[in-house]
Amino acid sequence: MKQRKVSILLLLTASLLGGCFGGERKEPPAASATPTPTATSPAASATPAPTATSPAASATPAPTATSPAASATSPRYVEDGEHAVAITLDDEPRLQAPIRTTVAETPQTYTLHFRESMDRASAESALAANMTKQSASPADDFKLAFDWRSDTELKLSVSSAAADILIRVQYTLNANDARTAAGLTLRDTPSFHAIVTKTQQLWRLATDGGKLERAGTLEQPYWLHTLTGDPRYMLASRYTETCECDAPYPKLYGVFDSAEGKFAAYPVELTTTYWGKGDFVADTRGFFYARPDGGPTVPPSDTAYDVHVDAFVYGAGISRDRRYVLMAAGEEGQTADLDLIVYDLHTRQTFTHKKTLLGELQENMISDGRMPILFKDDGKFVYTSMYRLDPVRISVEILYRYNWQKGRLEKWESPLPEQQSANAGFLASYDDVYRYYDNGGLYRGNEQVLPPMPGTSPYFWIDGTHAYVSAKYHAATEGKSNAYHEFFVYDADSGESRPIAKLAATDLFAFVGGSGDGRWLYFTGPDTLQSPAK
């Protein structure tokens, strides 16, 4: 069957549209150009290919002569228009109309499944006209390519020459006013509102300052962050919908293998801690998910282990050696004085320390709920915390650590002043000589070496050294677009900094993680990185 293409003039919204992204970007197979149409039956190929038309012609088809009786007849509409057509993004089939979501700047192919056989020319004209009607300002030449697989299935490819220049542009797919083969008109059909956005690419920078190179290619706009000390596997996430609001839209999740360049989509929520019933899966690459009750199947993995405990879990973490899962647990609805459970993934043995996590779960400042407990293992101790209410400072952190050698939970004290001790999270050097506290700066033992420096906290320590890697953002000078990120290594022993690289600032920049040996810094950025403008 011949493929038919129509070029239309599309007015675009060039204003930046903020998505509801947060933290950790769940990325699917590469977007591809419109597939070459395959041979079809004689009946299907009987429809003549439409000829190219000017934007004006395709926006307003020339009227045909009709009799007065025909003109007076109002159109007959299909029933249940909401289900008359399904529109799905091929590269991420979990995104379906009605939806308002982000798509990559590369050509995108959609599958439209119509409930009834369609008048093909009418459907093409309606899709083109609706895109034009629903755009807002400056012009862009979008191209539509129609590939009918049958009278009820259409492959529609959308591309734009300007999409690789603009940060975000928009278009809408809607089949209203298309006619069925029986002459009924579609209305109230679902719309797919696509916000074209730049896709972050994965880069890595050698901490000795010698090399900057691409570390992975993403085909869809997901956010990434590393799961373990080895940045090979990264958790990928994206919101199903986007808006200029704080709506808690659901996310799509997957795991990106940067070594193989492969993306595995998961039909369940993936988290780096766990909150829920005591039947779940721990993947030793560094994430958890609730065990699916039939229905969706997850990708096979030899690193995934079933976990079962007779309790409700309020937070979980995987040990540094990837053998144990540590859990804070209790009755469902319990918010204080929890059990600590150490679960052996190999033997399925459970070691329960009853009501040793004294205190309350931290309150969630955004919702009315509570925050899950986090665990951080350095090989000797596993650090965690609970909270107690305080009439002056609202809440005070109670610091705990599980001693692997002694097999027990114990309290510990941070060197931070009392007014800063509400957050005692830290990042330690390989030998624990230095710690950088989120709320207190750099410490050697109980002695402060550097005060906290907003915007320059360590990304990670270089293994076997007392040096950490960080970056600082330099704002643009007045009247110029010369903002940049400066990457550097700070040596805690000498107190000296060594620059690694300077890169022009971009809203696509995000730190992802560091390699286990500290030789590489991983971050996301645009397709092409540039030096700062002068």
Image (cartoon, rainbow, N blue to C red):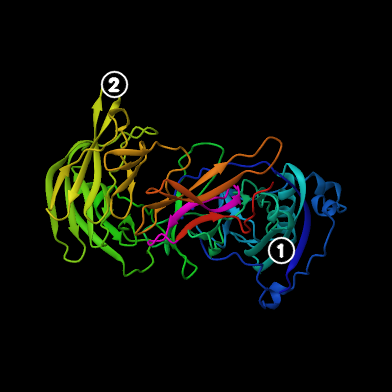
Whether residue 400 appears in magenta in the rendering, the answer is no
Residue 324 in sight from this viewpoint: yes
Where 335 falls versus 80 (above or below)?
above
Where 99 falls versus 236 (above or below)?
above
Q: Which mark is residue 311?
A: none
Q: Quadrant of residue 225?
A: bottom left
Q: Which residue type carries mark 1? A: Ala
Name the secondary structure under disc 1: strand
Q: Which residue type carries mark 2? A: Val
Where 455 falls versus 322 (above or below)?
above
Spatial CA distance of label 2 from label 1 is 64 Å
Left or right of 350? Residue 279 is right
Residue 228: x, y in percent?
A: 36, 59
Select label 2 or label 1 by which is in front. Answer: 2
- First in sequence: mark 2 vs mark 1: 1
Residue 71: x, y in percent?
A: 82, 46
Q: Nearer the viewer, residue 151 or 275?
A: 275
Left or right of 407? Residue 104 is right
Q: Residues within 10 Å of mark 1 (few under 14, many from 20)?
A: many
Residue 428: x, y in percent?
A: 32, 49
Left or right of 231? Residue 102 is right
Name the secondary structure under disc 2: loop
* Circle 2 residue: 392
* Circle 1 residue: 145
Whether residue 518 appears in magenta in the rendering, the answer is yes
Residue 80 in sight from this viewpoint: no
Q: Nearer the viewer, residue 342 or 402?
A: 402
Question: Which residues lie in the magenta part?
Answer: 499-519
Q: Quadrant of residue 111?
A: bottom right
Residue 239: x, y in percent?
A: 49, 49
Q: Residue furthest top?
A: 392
